[in-house]
Structure formats: structure tokens, C-alpha cells
């Protein structure tokens, strides 16, 4: 069952879907509010009364990407995006903009509930865990207390999940982290064979770090194994 008072906002122009999601989640103790266009949904989300947002990509007027982009300027509320079936481009854009997870519009209600519970657990864990000390690897400094990363004293603009991925890699600098480990650490859910969300976050991190995957200074891909953050002066794994 949901924690008492857990309030979910669904932003989708499909009123039938909103009603079905509300009825289903309601049986598990969630309170669900629906908004049927992006602007109304954004206004509600900015009020800060919700524990998570379920956000559709394709809406007339203000689409889900723009809603998420504007919301992330003021809020870190967990966002679960609904994308078109098999539309990898939507998933990539959503994750890079700051979505915590995604589901195709053909989702099963059981999967929706599992993904929602996962992003809520992660959000609650971050809000209750004591902040650890800053981690330094070369010219990178990650500060969990402020959830910021600087590169050569330059502040990087990272999404919440990107921060968690980079912090995990920095804490294990020089050691391989598998995709499964990273998913469990930062998303609190089991690895799925076709879930490439970690790859998307790594790609975005590389771009923000100015890192070349063919000749990496920071993040190295270890084929069939995962990723590692290179220690200063290290040539990585052959």
C-alpha cells in the first residue's frame, strides 16, 4: 500500500486513461489528481503538493518535454514519463531533460505501479539519508549535501539521476560498475534486458563533461561489463 498521504499528479490529455490510472492507484492508497493539458499540469506541479508526477509526452499546446523542462527549473519532484510505443527518441529526450523513469503508453497497470513505487522510494531515500562528505576525483568534485558537481571549479548542470550516476561512479573510481548496479543504486529497480536508460544518462554525462567515449578522460565503457570512472593518470582497462 502507499504511504498515507501520497499524492500523485497525472498530466495527460487522455481523460479516460487518467480516470483508469486514478482508479487503479486509488485501490493502493494513492490520491490522484489529473490535469488534461500541459499548462494546467505545470501550474499544479509547481505548487509542490505532489509526491510524483506521471507525465505524457504527446499533448496539444505545451507538450510533456516542455512541461518537464520548465518544471525542472524549480522542482526535483520525481517524474515518470509516458512515451509512444518503442519511441526511443522520446525516452532519450525525456531522460536527458530530467525524467526519473519512463513507460510506453502500452504499459500494464502492474508495471506502472512498480515504476511509480521505485521512483518514490528513491526520492524518499534521498530526502532522509544523511549527506555524505564531498568526493573528489581529479578535477571533479561531487558534493552530496548540495547535490552539485564542479569540473575544474565550473558548476555542471546535471539532472537528479545524472548526479546520482556520476556520484556512484566517482565513489567507485577505478572499479567497474555494471548497468545492473547503477540501476539499482540510482533508480532502485531491477535491470531489464532492453532498458538502456543508464546508457542514455552516461551519454548525457559525457557530453556535459566534454568527454570523448573513443578516448575518454572520465568515463570508460567496458564492453559487456559496464562503466568505470578513470582515476587521474589512469589509462583505464584495455
Image (cartoon, grey):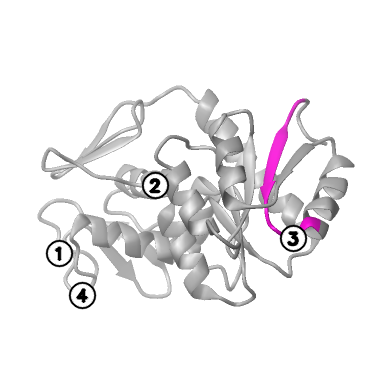
Q: Which label's residue is closer to the chain start, 3 or 2?
A: 3
Residue 51 appears at what percent x and percent y?
A: 64, 34
Q: Which label's residue is closer to the chain start, 4 or 1?
A: 4
Q: Nearer the viewer, residue 52 or 152?
A: 52
Under circle 4, the secondary element is loop
The answer to whether residue 181 shows anywhere in this view is no
The answer to whether residue 56 shows anywhere in this view is yes
Under circle 1, the secondary element is loop
Q: Nearer the viewer, mark 1 or mark 2?
A: 2
Q: Spot the residue most to the front.
A: 61
Residue 31 appears at what percent x and percent y?
A: 79, 35
Q: Nearer the viewer, mark 4 or mark 2?
A: 2
Q: Nearer the viewer, mark 3 or mark 4?
A: 3
Residue at image mark 2: 159
Q: Are marks 3 and 2 in contact (CB under 8 Å)?
A: no
Crowding around mark 3 (Cα neighbors within 10 Å: few <14, some 14 to 19, many 20+) is few
Q: Label 1, label 2: how many angstroms apart (C-alpha)?
A: 28 Å
Rendered residue at 19%/63% (across/down): 211
Residue at image mark 4: 214
Which quadrant holds the N terminus? top right
Disc number for residue 235: 1
Residue 216 appears at what percent x and percent y?
A: 19, 66
Magenta extent? 5-15
Crowding around mark 4 (Cα neighbors within 10 Å: few <14, some 14 to 19, many 20+) is few
- Choose top left, top right, bottom left or bottom right for residue 213: bottom left
Q: Nearer the viewer, mark 3 or mark 2?
A: 3
Q: Label 4, label 2: how many angstroms apart (C-alpha)?
A: 24 Å
Residue at image mark 3: 14
In the rendered view, does 115 fall on the left or right side of 196? right
> Is residue 31 part of the magenta span, yes or no?
no
Q: Are marks 3 and 1 in contact (CB under 8 Å)?
A: no
Amino acid at each position: 500500500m502507499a504511504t498515507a498521504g501520497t499524492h500523485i499528479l497525472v498530466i495527460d490529455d487522455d481523460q479516460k486513461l487518467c480516470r483508469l490510472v486514478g482508479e487503479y492507484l486509488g485501490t493502493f492508497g494513492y490520491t490522484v489528481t489529473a490535469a488534461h493539458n500541459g499548462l494546467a499540469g505545470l501550474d499544479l506541479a509547481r505548487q509542490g503538493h505532489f509526491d510524483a508526477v506521471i507525465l505524457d509526452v504527446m499533448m496539444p499546446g505545451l507538450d510533456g518535454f516542455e512541461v518537464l523542462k520548465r518544471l525542472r527549473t524549480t522542482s526535483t519532484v520525481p517524474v515518470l514519463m509516458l512515451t509512444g510505443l518503442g519511441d526511443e527518441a522520446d525516452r532519450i529526450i525525456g531522460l536527458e531533460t530530467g525524467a526519473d523513469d519512463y513507460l510506453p503508453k502500452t504499459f500494464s497497470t502492474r508495471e506502472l505501479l512498480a515504476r511509480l513505487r521505485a521512483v518514490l522510494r528513491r526520492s524518499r531515500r534521498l530526502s532522509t539519508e544523511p549527506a555524505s562528505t564531498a568526493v573528489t576525483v581529479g578535477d571533479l568534485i561531487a558534493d552530496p549535501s548540495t547535490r552539485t558537481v564542479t569540473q575544474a571549479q565550473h558548476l555542471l548542470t546535471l539532472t537528479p539521476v545524472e548526479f546520482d550516476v556520476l556520484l556512484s561512479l566517482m565513489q567507485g573510481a577505478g572499479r567497474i560498475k555494471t548497468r545492473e548496479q547503477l540501476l539499482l543504486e540510482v533508480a532502485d529497480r531491477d535491470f531489464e534486458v532492453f532498458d538502456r536508460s543508464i546508457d542514455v544518462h552516461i551519454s548525457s554525462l559525457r557530453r556535459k563533461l566534454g568527454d570523448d567515449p573513443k578516448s575518454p578522460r572520465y568515463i570508460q565503457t567496458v564492453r559487456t561489463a559496464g562503466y568505470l570512472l578513470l582515476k587521474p593518470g589512469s589509462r583505464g582497462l584495455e
